[in-house]
Image: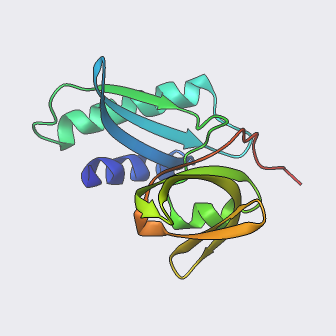
């Protein structure tokens, strides 16, 4: 997975795109390698096709025994994944859903307004309280109903 992410990151950097998130998981139709890409103003279908073709070729020549998989490349959409620590600062003020690997205060699922990240702890404002979630405990995080960054 690390090698796949590294290949995808280098490809996106070369194409002037942001690699938002990489997922490699089992689904009903088999294994899926899913790349989410973005750029200011959004990505087009042609951007996705271009990255998909190049990434497929890179995987074919760079990784042995990856096994059968389907490659999907898309924009992050309105439920944009949060993958990097910098995402939690960048999208401060937006609503996010976070699922943790272990319970925090008796729960694993949280929804609230991102308040940022400091010292490896993600702050999430839920109603009148703020929950601190260790970054390394986050299993999955996504923005809720996100419609892009303003181009001020």
Task: Determine whether 104 is above or below 149 in the image.
Answer: below
Check the image and name the residue furthest to the left. 65
Which picture quadrant has residue 101?
A: bottom left
Residue found at x 43% / y 60% = 103
Expressed as whole percent of the image width and height from the top left, the position of residue 21 reads 47, 47
Residue 49's spot in the image, x, y percent?
Answer: 49, 25
User: In the depicted view, which residue is nearer to us: 110 or 92?
Assistant: 110
The residue located at (57%, 24%) in the rendering is 46
Task: Residue 28: name its quadrant.
Answer: top left
Identity of the residue drawn at 72% across and 63% down: 92
Q: Which color scheme does this rendered protein use?
A: rainbow
**Residue 35 placement (x, y as % from top left):** 44, 38
- Name the residue: 69% across, 37% down: 42
Furthest toward the top, the residue is 29
123 relative to 78, above or below: below
Observer-nearest of 150 and 27: 27
Q: Quadrant of residue 39?
A: top right
Furthest-right residue in view?
152
View extreme (bottom): residue: 119
x then y, percent, for residue 71: 35, 27
Q: Total marks drawn?
A: 0
Report the side of 13 relative to 59 (left or right): right
Q: Quadrant of the C terminus?
A: bottom right
């Amino acid at each position: 997975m690390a090698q796949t992410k590294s290949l995808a990151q280098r490809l996106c950097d070369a194409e002037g795109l942001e690699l938002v998130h990489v997922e490699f998981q089992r689904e009903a139709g088999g294994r899926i390698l899913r790349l989410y890409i973005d750029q200011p103003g959004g990505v087009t279908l042609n951007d996705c096709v271009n990255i998909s073709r190049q990434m497929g070729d890179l995987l074919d020549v760079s990784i042995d025994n990856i096994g059968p998989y389907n490659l999907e490349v898309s924009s992050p959409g309105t439920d944009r994944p949060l993958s990097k620590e910098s995402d939690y600062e960048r999208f401060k003020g937006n609503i996010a859903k976070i699922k943790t690997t272990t319970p925090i205060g008796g729960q694993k699922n949280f929804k609230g307004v991102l308040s940022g990240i400091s010292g490896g702890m993600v702050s999430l404002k839920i109603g009148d309280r703020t929950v601190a979630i260790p970054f390394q405990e986050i299993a999955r995080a996504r923005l809720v109903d996100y419609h892009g960054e303003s181009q001020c």
